[in-house]
Amino acid sequence: MTTHRSSLFARLVRRVAIVLMLGAASLITAAWFYARTAADEAYDRLLLGAAFQMSESLTVADGALRFVLPPSAFELLGLAQRDRIFYRVIDPAGSTLTGYADLEPKTSLSQSRNGPVFGNTEYRGAAVRTVTLSRAMTLNDGTGWTYVVVAQTVEARQALASELTTRATFLVTVMSLLALGGTALAVRYSLRPVDVLGDALRQRDPQDLTPMSVDVPRELIPFMTSINHFINRLDERVKLLQRYVADSAHQIRTPLTALTAQVSLINEDNLTPDDRRHLERVRNRTAELARFTNQLLNHAMVIHRFDSGQLAAVSLNDVARKAFRAAIPITVDPDMVVSFEAAEDDPVIRGDMLSLREAIANVIDNALRHGASSRLDVRVTRDGGYGRIEVSDDGAGIPVEEWGNVTKRFYSTRPDKGASGLGFAIASEVASVLGGRIGFREKAEGQDFCVFIEVPLATEERV
């Protein structure tokens, strides 16, 4: 099951998006309040202008208060076509001179003596905005205060506030999206040093354990320092491991060689038949131990070379010939017929000479020890885009059902004959690393059992 891991880029963009959303919400809220205030100011001026015109229309004739409704006042308020208009003119005695007698502002009329008073109330089931304006008038019985109350429904101002808010919301949304896109590009560009550092690590040679020197921002310096510290520790461990393997190989091979030599010096003439059988078993076990130890060390060497070495162009004829010479002992049975056949066009692959030679030698050694009865052939051929090394023998061969198991480490079809189970494993690992494989061809009439290693040919086939 794959674990989902969010990227640093996604985290940064997500957090910036949250900040932008909060900022956009604040701006839209502020725009809504501003739109309401602007709409109220615009329509309040119209309302106040109409009230002033009505107030100026109050006159005194023959000691009585007269009022003529100016048409221009309603024309001014008529600019808001959706709204309804209500008004009331009150004389100094507090009686309604004209207009809607039940129109009452929320505030006291006397408050308007210091200046126009605006208010919000509800009249005849509709929300209205009112303005109260006072004017001192001199009548026969003295000076008194007249009042003009003008009310207007709020549909137009609400529509204006809504329109202003919608426009502001659209602009804020567009700007927020542009800011988010710009932020994403800026974050992506700012995180490029992380990608550069990752590329430098991926492209680094496996055997290069020197400290890295990549130009990174100040924030990545602690990370860079930790990487270099780890590289230094790894370098020390690798050197220690290499020294341990080299020392172990020397310390193990030296006593094994001495033990083999000592066993060979034992005089068998004075031994009983049982002692001779025991001595022969000691010789066989010593030889098996030496061979098994060499294979283990060679396996470790092959793995280390592929981890730290560079592949180069290799002549398949040359490497197969060297493996053939190394695997066929001088003391081979004289009745055994061995042969080597090189390819005419000398296929060239990209690989490691030492590791590939070890792989081929293991296959030849396995055929020589556990397969061939009287004949062993090694042949280099070309098969399409692959170079192939075939090792054929006249032995019984490996059963088809065992082909998938013999390339596993320490698996052997003949454990009773001193087989370590590492020969085919080494060959399979080398072929796999080079992009090839190890395969088998079943013994048939007129054909010997064959084990082959095939690897892709290099683009340039000449060393």
Image (cartoon, helix red, strand yellow):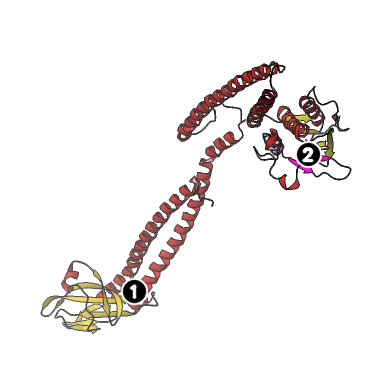
Horizontal and vertical percent position of residue 359: 72, 32
Does the magenta portion include 293? no
For mark 2, give the secondary structure: strand
Q: Which mark is residue 451?
A: 2
Place residue 278 in its image quadrant: top right
Q: Does the CB distance between marks 1 and 2 fall below 8 Å? A: no
Horizontal relation, residue 204 to residue 326: left or right: left
Horizontal and vertical percent position of residue 337: 86, 30
Place residue 330 in its image quadrant: top right
Does the magenta portion include 443? yes
Q: Name the residue under label 1.
A: 154
Horizontal and vertical percent position of residue 242: 58, 24
Q: Which of marks 1 and 2 is in front?
A: 2
**Mark 1: few, some, or many residues within 10 Å (few <14, many ≥20)?**
many
| Magenta span of residues | 431-451
Determine the residue located farthest toward the front in the rendered image: 272
Residue at image position (61%, 31%) is: 206
Q: Which of 16 and 154 is in front in this view?
A: 16
Q: Nearer the viewer, residue 283 or 153?
A: 283
